Image (tube, rainbow, N blue to C red):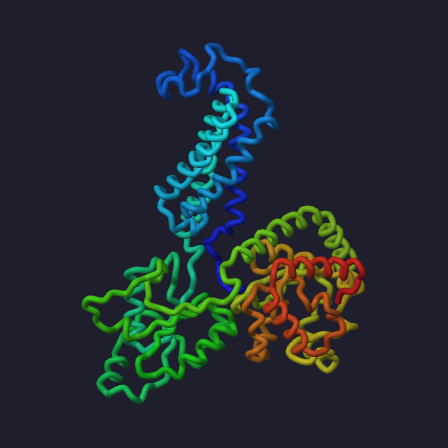
């Protein structure tokens, strides 16, 4: 579930929007169809525009010929699925940003007439009234307009975010200096920085098979991106630096370094592109590299982690936004009551405690909780270390003397966690995911612990609903987080949220 912001719109979301546009067009067409009929009559605004006899309308308007909306709903039922299928066949549910405006408009304009033609066959076969034909004609115009407005709005919004760099992925290059230099030149000539950014490169281990002349040549190369260390530093770098993709340029002579690179990217769920160095720095005469439409235009083998940029992940984010926005509004009175209670019982303490933690791919962010501890809680941690009941880097005392009386109540029902909803709405966290790590804890993490950072942290997870008060070993805690990563699905998130609600209601919080 790793990855940065994606420019892919879920097919389900895009299809739902298309269907909504068609429904709105149908309702609007039913309302405006009598007026369109008026324009089609002799002397009307559309006289002479359409072929004579196309509608065979009566000489005077007869509004009674237009049945209620329910009676003509067959038009929508018949055309909507055909329109969506036409959109699919024309490539309308691919990556929206890959379309030019002309292709985008063509897909929106062509799809409804295909469906309308299907409906016209039904009208002809069943010999339906002429008023139905006016309704179908009006609906066709409105559905084209609706799809065009909906899809153009999404496309324009995404283009603006793309121009602002919101979808850019950070790329790390591994390889020999000569190959890295070629890659940098290739990126600058062919790859927009709004889509991919070179963050730096890692040097391979010294290759003894290189001639002295080759080594001197590599040493004098001035590579315009920063060298971030050696290939052995990859694991630590993936933890502490937001890297979305790794390009490993496979040397023609040294290959033993590649296996650890594959294992590190696999462990931390980072997309890996393996590129043969021979195809980069060599010279081809008649042969040319055939690309698969990939934006990087590289001869490559791509290893992508499961869930990366999938529709389910985008749906997960949409659920986070919808649920947290709703809860923040509904719980605003409770927020106010808790804030007043904190100030009345401990006037010297702030209402919110700033939580400086580390999230996805080692990104640092500040979240907030309601204050439940004394002002010197962080200072006293060292003197209370001998009472720590958790084995590992996490500090936890069941009857912590630093907790205020009100804080014990808030913690019992997990009410102190509510301000984290704001972090979810901002995108730093998710409703469900591994617990964020304190910055001082991360320094004591073992490498396998750090795999939990390959997904976005959450307010609740398996550790929250699996008896967290009885977990005394940090390793067991991390194993639950890793189990969540392996088993992740939207259905698992739903079950965890349901169990969390029960844990809060029953008062089995921390």
Q: Nearer the viewer, residue 492 or 243?
A: 492
Residue 493, position as x, y percentages in the image: 65, 60
Say left or right for 204 vs 74: left
Up the image or down, 211 lies above or below 201; here it is below
Q: Residue at x 66, y 50 (%)?
A: 328
Toward which corner of the image does residue 180 lie, by quadrant?
bottom left
Q: Residue at x 39, y 61 (%)?
A: 196
Toward which corner of the image does residue 367 lie, by quadrant?
bottom right
How many numbered discs?
A: 0
Q: Nearer the viewer, residue 449 or 10?
A: 10
Say left or right for 318 vs 390: left
Q: Nearer the viewer, residue 457 or 250?
A: 250
Say left or right for 60 vs 368: left
Up the image or down, 26 lies above or below 367; here it is above
- Residue 160 appears in the figure: no
- Residue 262 appears in the figure: yes
């Amino acid at each position: 579930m790793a990855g940065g912001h994606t420019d892919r719109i879920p097919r389900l979301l895009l299809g739902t929007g298309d269907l909504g546009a068609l429904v709105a067009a149908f309702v609007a067409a039913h309302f405006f169809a009598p007026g369109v009929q008026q324009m089609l009559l002799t002397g009307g605004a559309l006289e002479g525009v359409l072929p004579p006899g196309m509608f065979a309308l009566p000489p005077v308007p007869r509004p009674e010929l237009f049945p209620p909306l329910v009676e003509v709903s067959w038009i929508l039922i018949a055309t909507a699925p055909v329109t969506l299928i036409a959109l699919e066949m024309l490539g309308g549910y691919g990556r929206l940003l890959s379309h030019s405006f002309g292709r985008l408009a063509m897909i929106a304009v062509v799809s409804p007439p295909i469906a309308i033609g299907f409906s016209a066959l039904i009208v002809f076969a069943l010999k339906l009234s002429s008023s139905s034909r006016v309704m179908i004609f009006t609906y066709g115009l409105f559905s084209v307009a609706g799809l065009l407005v909906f899809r153009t709005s999404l496309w324009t919004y995404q283009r603006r975010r793309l121009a602002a760099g919101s979808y850019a992925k950070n790329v790390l290059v591994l390889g020999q200096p000569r190959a890295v230099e070629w890659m940098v030149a290739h990126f600058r000539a062919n790859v927009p920085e709004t889509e991919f950014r070179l963050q730096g490169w890692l040097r391979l281990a010294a290759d003894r098979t290189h001639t002295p002349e080759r080594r001197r040549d590599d040493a004098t190369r001035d590579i315009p991106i920063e060298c971030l260390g050696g290939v052995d530093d990859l694991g630590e770098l993936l933890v502490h630096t937001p890297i979305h993709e790794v390009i490993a340029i496979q040397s023609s002579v040294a290959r033993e370094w590649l296996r650890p690179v594959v294992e590190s990217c696999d462990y931390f769920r980072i997309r890996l592109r393996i590129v043969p160095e021979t195809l980069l720095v060599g010279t081809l005469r008649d042969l040319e590299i055939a690309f698969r439409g990939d934006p990087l235009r590289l001869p490559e083998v791509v290893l992508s982690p499961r869930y990366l940029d999938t529709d389910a992940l985008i749906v997960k984010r949409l659920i986070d936004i919808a649920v947290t926005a709703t809860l923040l509004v509904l719980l605003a009175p409770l927020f106010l009551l808790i804030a007043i209670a904190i100030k009345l019982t401990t006037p010297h303490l702030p209402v919110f405690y700033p939580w400086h933690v580390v999230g996805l791919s080692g990104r640092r962010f500040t979240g907030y909780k309601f204050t439940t501890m004394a002002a010197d809680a962080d200072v006293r941690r060292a003197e209370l270390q001998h009472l720590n009941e958790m084995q590992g880097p996490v500090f936890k005392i069941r009857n912590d003397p630093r907790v205020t009386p009100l804080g014990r109540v808030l913690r019992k029902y997990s009410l102190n966690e509510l301000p984290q909803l704001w972090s979810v709405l901002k995108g730093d966290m998710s409703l469900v995911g591994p617990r964020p790590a304190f910055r001082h804890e991360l320094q004591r993490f073992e490498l396998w612990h750090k795999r939990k950072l390959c997904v976005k942290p959450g307010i609740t997870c398996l550790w929250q609903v699996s008896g967290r008060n009885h977990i005394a070993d940090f390793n067991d805690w991390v194993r639950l987080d890793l189990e969540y990563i392996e088993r992740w699905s939207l259905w698992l998130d739903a079950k965890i949220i349901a169990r969390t609600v029960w844990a809060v209601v029953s008062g089995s919080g921390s």
